[in-house]
Image: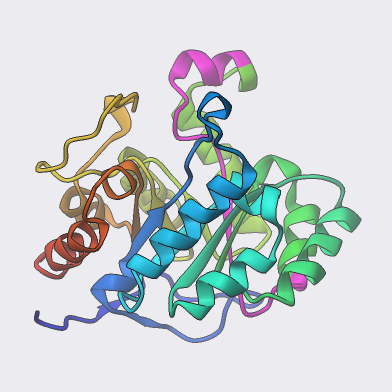
Amino acid sequence: METVLFREAYQPQEGNMGGTKLLKPAERLVVGVESKPNPKRGQNRDWAVGQVINLAHKLKGTEVYIKVESTLVACGYDLIAVIHSCGLKVFADTKLSGMPEKLSAHGVLLNEYKPELVTVMCATGVTGMKALKAELPNTEVLGVPVLTSFKDTDADEVFDRSVDEAVIRFARLADDAAIDGLILAPGEVQMIRKNFGEVMTLNCPGVRSDWMVIRDDDQNYGRVMTPAMAIRAGADRVIVERAVTQSLHPYEVVMRLIEEIASIRP
């Protein structure tokens, strides 16, 4: 497979991660590995943790990011070290929120494990995001403006504004806090690039290729794109979940995705 290097879209500001990195196609792919246990089938915490570790071993050597959320909460940060031992990067999708001193404490504890990516809710405010980032100088801190599952009716109920208006509002807080990037639905990427330029990395769930078949697909198709569409719009990384976790051959799916990303041209 051809090796193509992509320059990250953002130029770090003071307080952001220093240096402009080069990303290989594999480093633009995040694989979400959450599996919901079914207690009726005897599935519990240990089963869920085992699913993450099993998939990490299957993807060993691919250099992709592994995104963990509920399993990380249940198992603890030691899971980060296990994933790292497979030669993979870790996206700790913690969606942190709270008082600044609590976020600072989270940062201190997370910094011991060196996850490559960590998420924080932008609604926690500028001071809180700054406190977290101060303790994670070598981790890319990503703000979540609005959950990507939200429709305008959800955003109106929670924020009294549309999804786009809420995304802009909270992206501005992330920019003021000088954190490293954002989690966005693919359709929001161009809007954020237009309003904020190349300051932050943009990382997109809700991405699936045309060839993917996903059981019980419940995604909001108004906010979904293919990898090519998302990257051409300005996304730095794409996040894929069930297409990999549901497959009997996850390594082959991931390698096909990496090849697809490598083939994308402006």
Residue 181: horizontal and vertical position, in percent? 51, 60
| Magenta-highlighted residues | 134-157
Taking the spot 32% from the left edge, 66% from the top edge, the residue there is 28
Q: Does residue 252 belong to the magenta stretch?
A: no
Instruction: Tell me: 220 left or right of 164.
Output: left
Q: Quadrant of residue 66?
A: bottom left
Residue situated in front as seen by the camera: 228 or 266: 228
- Observer able to see residue 84: yes
- Tell me which residue sits at (33%, 68%) in the image: 59
Above or below, 205 against 160 in this view is below
Report the number of numbered marks.
Answer: 0
Position of residue 19 in the picture relative to residue 75 (left or right): left
x then y, percent, for residue 240: 33, 49
Q: Residue furthest bottom?
A: 19
Rendered residue at 63%/54% (across/down)? 72
- 8 versus 126 height, above or below: below
Residue 29 sits in which quadrant?
Answer: bottom left
Q: Work out whether residue 9 can be spotted.
A: no
The stretch drawn in magenta includes residue 149: yes
Q: Is residue 111 above or below residue 168?
A: below
